[in-house]
């Protein structure tokens, strides 16, 4: 009898210890959670707005925004104004990494303790232009042109500037002398600009026409492989080509 009593006592004590070691995922009561959830939605919406502004800025300036300040004119709101909207107990201040196309993970440890809210923040329920990877908010570029400009900048680790500048690199821009179209993008073989591979107006990148070199040995280069499927191409002699899934095909 004594042994049975001792066993029950030990079992109860062990259960109590185990329960105290369990993680409490209910940081907030129901009403508090509803309030925080609304704030959480607002923060996600901020991040989505920043992602949209990032793409607009990239397309308009041919460069990556260095900080949130660069996006203020696109967003129509300053960083300080956005910070004031957020509860600092729940959310960290915004930090934009323009080079890596990402925003800092913004939940404080207080919110992270609540599994429901943490999962909601990290899910794609309210996200279209962003997703979470490696503890960062990653920005999604939607247009092929924006992806192209970003990849060109990343490849040469330099923003697209005037081709007249000797330090521009092998990817650069030239002014439209007619003043009708936006600056167009030039792609050379090297930064010495000794061989032109292609050039195009930004508005023509999705469907064409894009002007390319007729030397097929360059068609395996990444600049040609990233061209949108089905885009119409012309070489310097006016011969027509088409971008297919596997290659660039001459149209007879």
Image (spheres, grey):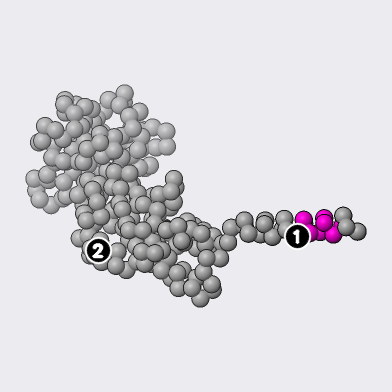
Residue occupying the point 12% across, 45% down? 176
Q: Is residue 232 magenta?
A: no
Badge 2 element? helix
Q: Give left or right: position of 172 versus 118.
A: left
Residue occupying the point 19% across, 41% down? 160
Q: Residue 127: image x %, image y %?
A: 43, 59
Q: Residue 30: image x %, image y %?
A: 54, 73
Q: Which residue is mark 2?
A: 80
Q: Which residue is mark 1?
A: 12
| Outermost residue to the bottom | 31
Q: Residue 90: image x %, image y %?
A: 41, 63
| Outermost residue to the right | 1
Q: Could you tell me if residue 237 is visible in this image?
A: no
**Above or below 79: residue 152:** above
Badge 1 element? helix
Task: Write down the quadrant of residue 156 in the picture.
Answer: top left
**Above or below 247: residue 63:** below
Q: Is residue 8 magenta?
A: yes
Q: Nearer the viewer, residue 106 or 209?
A: 106
Q: Give left or right: position of 10 versus 179.
A: right
Rendered-image quadrant of the C terminus: top left
Q: Give left or right: position of 72 versus 104.
A: left
Segment tinted magenta in the rendering: 4-11
Counting every numbered tag in the picture gives 2
Residue occupying the point 28% across, 47% down? 98
How many angstroms separate mark 2 from mark 1 (CA)? 54 Å
């Amino acid at each position: 009898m004594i042994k049975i009593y001792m066993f029950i006592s030990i079992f109860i004590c062990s259960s109590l210890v185990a329960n105290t070691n369990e993680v409490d995922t209910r940081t907030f009561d129901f009403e508090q959670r509803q309030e925080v959830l609304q704030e959480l939605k607002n923060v996600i919406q901020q991040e989505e707005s920043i992602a949209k502004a990032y793409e607009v800025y990239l397309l308009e300036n041919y460069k990556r925004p260095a900080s949130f300040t660069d996006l203020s004119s696109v967003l129509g709101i300053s960083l300080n104004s956005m910070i004031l909207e957020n509860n600092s107990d729940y959310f960290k201040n915004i930090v934009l990494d323009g080079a890596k196309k990402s925003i800092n993970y913004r939940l404080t440890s207080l919110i992270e303790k609540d599994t429901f809210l943490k999962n909601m923040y990290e899910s794609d329920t309210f996200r279209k232009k962003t997703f979470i990877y490696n503890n960062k908010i990653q920005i999604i570029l939607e247009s092929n042109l924006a992806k192209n400009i970003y990849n060109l900048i990343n490849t040469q680790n330099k923003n697209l500037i005037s081709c007249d500048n000797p330090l521009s690199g092998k990817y650069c821009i030239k002014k439209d002398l007619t003043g009708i179209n936006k600056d167009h993008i030039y792609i050379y073989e090297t930064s010495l600009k000794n061989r032109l591979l292609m050039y195009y107006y930004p508005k023509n990148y999705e469907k064409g026409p894009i002007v390319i070199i007729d030397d097929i040995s360059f068609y395996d280069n990444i600049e040609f492989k990233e061209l949108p499927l089905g885009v119409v191409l012309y070489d310097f002699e006016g011969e027509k080509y088409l971008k297919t899934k596997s290659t660039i095909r001459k149209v007879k």
